[in-house]
Amino acid sequence: MKQKHRRGEKGRGKDSPNDEVSNHRRSGQEFLASLPNNGLPACMVVDLQMPAMGGLELKQHLVRDGLDIPTIMITAHSDAGLDANEKAGLVAFLQKPLQDRNLFAAIDKALGVSRDGG
C-alpha cells in the first residue's frame, strides 16, 4: 500500500526526490497504526487482498471513523466480487497487471489533477 503526503506534511524526508513521499505498508492494520504519526494521505492505493486486513475492510474502517481518503483499489482477481455500492466509494478499481496510464489517471482523479494540456 502506498500513502502519499501533501507538501509540507509530516513524513517528508531529506532524501525525498520531490514534494511527495510514498510510504509502503504491508497491511491495513499497519497503515491505521501509522496515521497518528504521519497525518492523512492525499490518496491511497491499496490491494483488495492484504494480510490481516484487506483493502476494502481498511476503506470501510476509515469511513466509519470519519476519514474519507480518496482510494484506488487494485486486485489480481477478475472476479473480486465487489458490489456496486462497494465500488461507488472508490476513485477507481483496477485489475493487475496495472497499466501505467490507468493508474496515473486514477491518481490524478483522486488528487483532482488534470493533465489534458499537451
Image (cartoon, grey):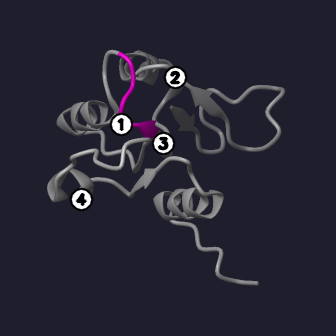
Residue 89 in the image, given as x and y percentages of width and height: 26, 54
Residue 13 within the magenta-colored segment of the rendering: no
The numbered mark at residue 4 is none
Residue name at image x 71 percent, y 83 percent? 117
In this view of the protein, which residue sits in the foreground, 74 or 33?
74
Q: In the rendered structure, which amino acid carries the disc numbered 1?
A: Leu
Residue name at image x 37 percent, y 21 percent? 32
For the residues labelled 3 and 2, the Cα–Cα distance comes to 11 Å
Count of numbered tags: 4
Q: To which residue does mark 3 refer? A: 45
Q: To which residue does mark 1 refer? A: 48
Q: Is label 1 or label 2 in front? A: 1
Q: Which residues are magenta?
A: 46-51
Residue 97 in the image, given as x and y percentages of width and height: 55, 48
Look at the numbered discs 3 and 1 and tell me whether their residues touch, using CB distance below 8 Å: no
Q: To which residue does mark 2 refer? A: 25
Residue 49 within the magenta-colored segment of the rendering: yes
Instruction: Assign a secondary structure to mark 1.
Output: loop
Of the residues under marks 1 and 4, which one precedes in the sequence?
A: 1
In this view of the protein, which residue sits in the foreground, 117 or 81?
81
Q: To which residue does mark 4 refer? A: 88
Residue 74 in the image, given as x and y percentages of width and height: 43, 45
Of the residues under marks 3 and 2, which one precedes in the sequence?
A: 2
Of the residues under marks 4 and 2, which one precedes in the sequence?
A: 2
Instruction: Assign a secondary structure to mark 2.
Output: loop
